[in-house]
């Protein structure tokens, strides 16, 4: 099955040294855009990951994934700037991040996944290949221990 490329909107101030998606920029199945300078392609047929949405399921496998990559503060602003209506889906709440966070990074630091962790779970649910998705992720082993 052929999937639409994953669209990632990364904030221009995202610290690339700490970015969990670092190393994935050259993948054929991902397209990275910089906020606020780049213009996004159409998000028709895409789903955006969101805490407060219905669960992502295998029924969504024909949809592309749109992911916002930024700190919590910036991500909220960026999500409001997406003008085109886009379907929103959440991930199961039982997964926990391995990414070390300070308490003030988000309201529930264990629930908030690193971008690559969220992508890994979404790809798994949708039946996509995850074999090398976490190869550059420093906390890969700790994250995978929960599966």
Image (spheres, rainbow, N blue to C red):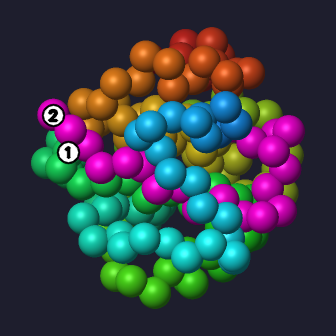
Q: Is residue 133 magenta?
A: no
SS state under label 1: loop
Residue 49 image-quadrant placement? bottom left
Q: Is residue 26 above or below residue 144?
A: below
Mark 2, residue position? 1
The span shown in magenta is: 1-20
**Front of the two marks 1 and 2:** 2
* Quadrant position of residue 10: bottom right
Is residue 53 visible in this depiction of the protein?
Answer: no
Q: Is 4 or 78 nearer to us in this picture?
A: 4
Residue located beneath label 1 in the image: 61
From the viewer's perspective, tell me whether residue 63 is left or right of residue 115: left
The spot of residue 28 in percent (x, y) is 44, 37
- Please state if 89 lies on the left or on the right of 145 as rendered: left
Residue 100 placed where, x, y %? 79, 34
Q: Nearer the viewer, residue 18 or 55?
A: 18
């Amino acid at each position: 099955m052929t999937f639409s490329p994953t669209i990632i909107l990364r904030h221009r101030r995202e610290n690339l040294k700490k970015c969990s998606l670092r190393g994935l920029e050259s993948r054929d199945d991902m397209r990275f855009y910089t906020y606020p300078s780049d213009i996004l392609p159409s998000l028709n047929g895409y789903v955006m990951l969101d805490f407060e949405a219905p669960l992502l399921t295998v029924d969504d496998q024909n949809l592309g994934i749109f992911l916002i990559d930024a700190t919590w503060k910036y991500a909220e602003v960026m999500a409001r700037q997406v003008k085109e209506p886009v379907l929103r889906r959440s991930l199961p709440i039982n997964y926990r991040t391995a990414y070390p966070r300070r308490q003030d990074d988000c309201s529930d630091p264990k629930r908030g996944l690193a971008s690559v962790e969220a992508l890994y779970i979404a790809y798994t649910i949708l039946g996509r290949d995850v074999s090398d998705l976490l190869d550059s992720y420093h906390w890969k082993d700790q994250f995978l221990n929960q599966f």
